Amino acid sequence: MSGIAGRTNYSDWEKKTSSLLSNLETETEQEIQEAKEALGQNGKYAYSEAEATERQKELEIMKKKKILSEYKERELGVVQVLSSMLFPLGETDGGKGGEGANRTNSTNGANGANDANNVAATESKGTSSDTTKYVTRDFMEAGKRVLNITNTTGPGTIVLTQDLSNLESSIPTTSTATGTGHGTAINKHKLTPKSYPQDAENTVPEETKDEQNKRTIHGLIKVSLTNLHNCTVTLRSKVITGLLEVSHCSNVIIKLCKESTIVTVQADLSNNLDIQFHDAPSGKCLSSPMPGSNSHGKFMYWGEDKDDRIFHAGVSDLKIGIYRDGYLENETFFDYKKQGNAQAVGNASAEEVQFVSSVVGGELITEKVLRQGSATSTTVAGGVGGSGSGSGGGARAMTEREMKEVEKRKEAIRKAVDERLGNDNNGGIKIIDKEGNEIPAQSSKSKDENKKDNDDVAEEVFTSMSSSDIDSIVKDCEAQKAKGNEAFVAGEYAQAVLLYTLVLDRAAELPDVTSTSTTGEGVKQLFPRHIVLSNRAASFLKLGHHEKALKDGIEAERLEPKYCKGVFRKGLALHAMGRYQEALTALSAALKIEPKNKQIKQALQFAEVRFQQELRKRMDG
């Protein structure tokens, strides 16, 4: 290329060469892409098995993250957080009452509409030091039934009004009662848990038959108070689970009135708490619509039943008072260091030592919990050493006194059975077969033969407990089980675990057979604990506690080997823990029980794929 006076035009030359090089690179890239597509190496397919495995892992991680995100959204979807109800933390009464009194933040932040509702539902009396906040349905966003009041300081009072008892939640019906008078018939329906998109564990198709299979429950599901200081909280609303959680509070008075339905209080890491029961009902009265209308017998106040308890750990200067008609009837004071002498043991700090306060012999007393249980919200592994096989995998939290009483009852049962079955004439016990026909006593039989014939012995064997007492315990178990099912359907899986374990705690008091049958037919039970264990295993799977789910599945299978759901959830837990070969065995056993179950077939296919991938990885490795 020539420029001026025969000189080369380097600028034009550079432009031409750059353009040619760019075209050449483009053509080369196109040829490479065409070659890759022809060879199937355009990125759509993996180059090697190792890359395919890595891609599969990435996809699984993305799916799990999505499922976890959706689970958190569901959990937050039922929790209503009310913050700075009186004064924000760090502020005190001194000209700031007007601003602090009207600040209420929900889970997704306060907005103009919420502020307007909160102000409309709030009433201030006198000066700012007399501020009283009334929590009504206007504070609760759609679908939120768990209330958490947090991060506020007084002086002032927060009142959970009776209006909250009118909150409605629609759930599948667990049972319906028909009939009148004393002969009421119970018609039970299968409770079908809700299924969510891409929810791997315990996926069950939604029941969509008709609206008659649903019913409406009223009230809050649970109430928790966290990080409150120098204030009073009054509860007048119905709480379906009967549970109140208190943590990181100081100088707080909690008043539980006759309209509330709080049975169990769990207080942790707090100082100077004053818990007052003002004509509050016992847990035995919660089967009635409202306190005072218990049609099953005499109305019982809080403390008159052994299951009315307050658990606390790391609480100093605790005061508990029971009031009747405005007068103090019973009270106790307790400090976990002074009276409890709590000390660190191993990795557990002194603040983790659990105590329980309850009414015993007409007096409020506080005892140290020796055997942890679900009611303390700390662990669901029953037994002193963590073994709860005798109580269905989860035992009632018990003190030394209660454990001695249980041992005495068990010893009395053993002696009574030995005395009545040890005689040649069978001690006057009526022995019946499965059809209800009486089997005549034969004195010539050996003890082993008599033991075999007495597998179908009538309820007279349980000499330490009457049939009415057994029926009462079974009814309590059914009621708590129904509440656990309701919590599971509502997505409150942690609460479902608590309620299911309360069922197992109560069922542990039944004098049924606890030895495994040599015929492989499971264990005789006065209440089907294997069903509750299976339900709790499903809840643990939802929460990601796979080892606990496995324990429940194993125990459910021990109690009833032919119960498909128990075996199936055992298999799901093993699969989630990466123990694919064992999962295949468990899932195959479940499929053998129910050969047409599509859900088990799908889980079995997944386990087979995982197991094959694991085998290839070992061979490559």
Image: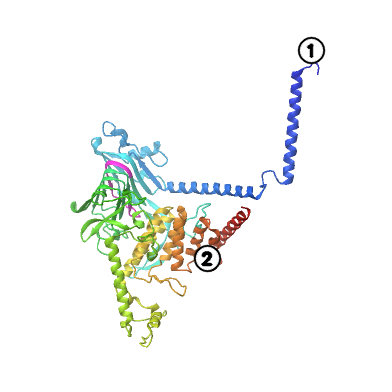
Farthest residue toward the bottom?
A: 444
In this view, the residue in front, 80 or 524, is 524
> Which residue position holds label 1?
4
- Residue 302 shows up from this direction: no
Residue 385: x percent and y percent? 37, 60
Q: Range of the magenta residues?
A: 226-243
Mark earlier in primary sequence (1, 2)? 1
Residue 94 can be seen, yes or no:
yes
Looking at the rendered structure, the secondary structure element under dot 2 is: helix
Q: What residue is at 41 percent from the left and 46 percent from the top?
A: 142
Mark 2, residue position: 590
Distance from label 1 to label 2 (Cα)? Answer: 92 Å
Other-residue count near label 2 (Cα within 10 Å), few / some / many at <14 / 14–19 / ≥20: many
Relative placement, left or right, of 436 versus 355 is right
Work out whether residue 159 or residue 243 is closer to the camera in this orientation and state it.
243
Horizontal and vertical percent position of residue 523: 42, 71
Amino acid type of the residue that numbered disc 2 sits on in the rendered structure: Ala
Residue 80: image location, x then y, percent: 38, 45
Residue 509 lies in quadrant: bottom left
